[in-house]
């Protein structure tokens, strides 16, 4: 998380856990679109608005979105919610570029090439528009990384639905193996 201090990284991870996976752990309830009042989040996590603003502003992946409505500020995670949270991000279908990319540990390659990319415990598979971002994502879990090219244009032409999150991450429910090709190995 470039640009954040060690303490801010810890705060960002706490916020992500609450907004993406376990709002009940902080005594919070997200609305149907994943939003919670900023004041409620601050009180639940015991952080200040300045601390929250620093995490939101300096997060290299724009993991969180803040909006103002009904006289208050609201916050949500931009994507990555577990299925148990069940959030409708309200993202319209979007036409993807011809190719998107997914970084993953090398150990997952055989399984992915036979079964495809599946969302598993999340609502969507996350794809990036470039190899550098895919590498960063893959390296969060392993130093031995492969990057897969996803034939997103062909998938869309075949009826698969894509969404583009506010922070530039492409989302789709799954990617069948026929649309995958090895792009790079541990570059």
Image: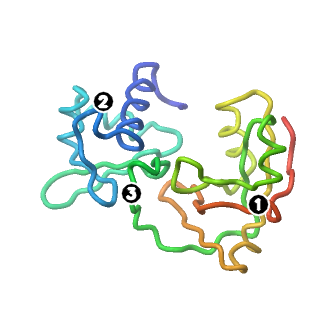
Which residue is painted at 25% across and 49% down in the image? 36
SS of the residue under disc 3: loop
Instruction: Find the distance from the CA under tag 2 to the CA under tag 3.
Output: 25 Å
Q: Which mark is residue 87?
A: 3
* Residue 182 image offset from top left, x and y in percent: 86, 51
Instruction: Find the distance from the CA under tag 2 to the CA under tag 1.
Output: 38 Å
Which residue is painted at 14% across and 61% down in the image? 70
Which residue is painted at 26% across and 56% down in the image? 31
Query: Which sits earlier in the primary sequence, circle 1 or circle 3?
Result: 3
* Residue 35 image offset from top left, x and y in percent: 29, 53
Q: On the rendered structure, is 25 left or right of 130?
A: left
Residue carrying label 1 = 150
Query: Which sits earlier in the primary sequence, circle 2 or circle 3?
Result: 2
SS of the residue under disc 1: strand
Which residue is painted at 36% across and 38% down in the image? 22
Q: Quadrant of the C terminus?
A: top right
Q: Which mark is residue 51?
A: 2
Give the number of the mark in front: 2 or 3: 3
For residue 127, what is the image quadrant? Answer: bottom right
> Depth check: 179 or 38 in front?
179
């Amino acid at each position: 998380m470039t640009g954040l201090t060690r303490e801010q990284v810890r705060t960002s991870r706490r916020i992500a856990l609450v907004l993406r996976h376990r709002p009940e752990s902080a005594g919070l309830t997200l609305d149907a679109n994943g939003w919670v009042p900023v004041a409620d989040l601050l009180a639940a996590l015991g952080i200040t608005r300045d601390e929250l603003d620093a995490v939101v502003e300096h997060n290299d992946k724009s993991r969180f979105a803040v909006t103002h409505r009904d006289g208050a500020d609201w916050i949500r995670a931009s994507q990555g919610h577990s299925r148990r949270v069940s959030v409708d991000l309200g993202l319209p279908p979007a036409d993807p570029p011809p190719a998107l990319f997914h970084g993953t540990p090398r150990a997952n390659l055989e399984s992915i090439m036979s079964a495809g990319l599946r969302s598993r415990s999340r609502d969507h598979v996350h794809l990036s528009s470039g190899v550098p971002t895919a590498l960063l994502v893959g390296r969060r879990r392993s130093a031995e990384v492969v990057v897969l090219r996803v034939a997103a244009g062909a998938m869309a032409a075949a009826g698969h639905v894509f969404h583009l999150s506010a922070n530039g991450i492409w989302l789709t429910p799954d990617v069948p193996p026929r649309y995958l090709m090895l792009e790079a190995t541990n570059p």
